[in-house]
Amino acid sequence: MSSRAQKRRVFPSLSRIRAFLHRRDHRPVFAGKFFSGGTKVIQTARNKPQRRQKVKPRQRIIVAKKQKIVRAVSLSLKIAVAGCAVAVLGMTVSRFVGSSSRFSIKHIGVTGNTHVTAQTIIQQSGLKEGENIFRSVLADAAASIARIPRVHSVVVRRKLPDEIHIEIKERRPAAILLADELLVLDHEKKIIERYDPAARIDLPILTGKQLAQYTVGDVIESDGIDGALHIIDLMNELGMAKSIGISEINIDDPDDILLIAEQSGATIHLGTGDYPGKLWRLKKVTEEIQRHGRLKLASLERVDMRFETIVPAKFGS
């Protein structure tokens, strides 16, 4: 054997070395899992034992995206199936409760009413016995009842299986308003009803030429009405009905509100502002008059409360 042939056996050619270094396993891969370090456990089609193989970054990204897509599709299918099941169950329950006679309204109860009758409230609500309790729109019923001027607030509730409860709070009268007719006014400046003499409401009368335009259900926005209602509240707190009864409050001039005494018909000028202090001084003056032997409250004609240090008063004969 020549020396040249021996060199070929001992030193393989460069092409063989390259083929050895770049040889690849072309067997198909059908399963795998990534590990740290850029490796992947694979199983070949020839059922060889699992082994780790280097995987290129781009290939790792593609496989990871496929796995995410599979998981997302699986989750979406599960959610869709669960949603369909819930929808079918809901339709079944709705059909049952909407047609069952067990849920027909058999009683409508009203509480909290004093002046408005239960029949008026039920009729205004639109609710009827025999209707399905779930088909009745309680919000609409409450809104209809709230349109009754005397009603301040209303709550409508279901009591399963067959009852409706209506709880109302009525408005409290604060004064009697002299317009084209006598009307009853509450503390929120709303006219709640026409005055009924049989009711015997002992409240002062509000007068003023600007009040003639109002009727039941209106909210008064005229100047002086806030001051008049504030004066009524203060008189109730001070208990002035015992010392000097006020039968009328005139707000023709909002800058000089007038009180008319019930016993003597005396005119009391309050002016505007500092109503608590003025009414407190007026109460003390009337108490002093009652204690005085020669002065009579019934002969009082005029009192001016617009001064801070003195209280001018005029008495008749």
Image: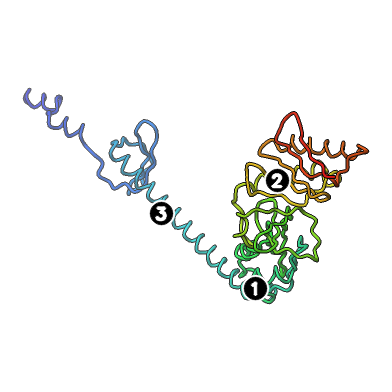
Quarter residue 255 falls in: top right
Could you say where residue 158 lies in the image, as x and y percent from the top left? 69, 64
Dot placed on the residue nearer the N-terminal end, 1 or 2: 1
Quarter residue 295 falls in: top right
**Residue behind mark 1:** 132
> Of 4 and 177, which appears nearest the observer?
177
Q: Is residue 84 left or right of residue 232?
A: left
Residue at 66% across, 58% down: 191
Compared with residue 252, is residue 155 higher up or lower down, i.e. above or below? below
Give neighbour class at mark 3: few <14, some 14-19, many 20+ (Cα, 10 Å): few
**Residue behind mark 3:** 73
Dot placed on the residue nearer the N-terminal end, 2 or 3: 3
Q: Quadrant of the C terminus?
A: top right
Q: Quadrant of the N terminus?
A: top left
Dot placed on the residue nearer the N-terminal end, 3 or 1: 3
User: Label 2 is placed on what type of residue?
Assistant: Leu
Q: Is residue 113 left or right of residue 23?
A: right
CA separation in Å, label 3 and label 1: 43 Å
Compared with residue 19, is residue 113 higher up or lower down, i.e. above or below? below
What secondary structure is marked by label 2? strand
**Residue behind mark 2:** 258
> Of 261 and 19, which appears nearest the observer?
261
Name the front one of labels 1 and 2.
2
User: Label 1 is placed on what type of residue?
Assistant: Asn
What secondary structure is marked by label 3? helix
Please identify the residue farthest to the right as the structure is shown: 293
CA separation in Å, label 1 and label 2: 57 Å
Give neighbour class at mark 2: few <14, some 14-19, many 20+ (Cα, 10 Å): many
Q: Determine contact: label 3, label 1, CB under 8 Å.
A: no
CA separation in Å, label 2 and label 3: 81 Å
Residue at 57% across, 66% down: 90
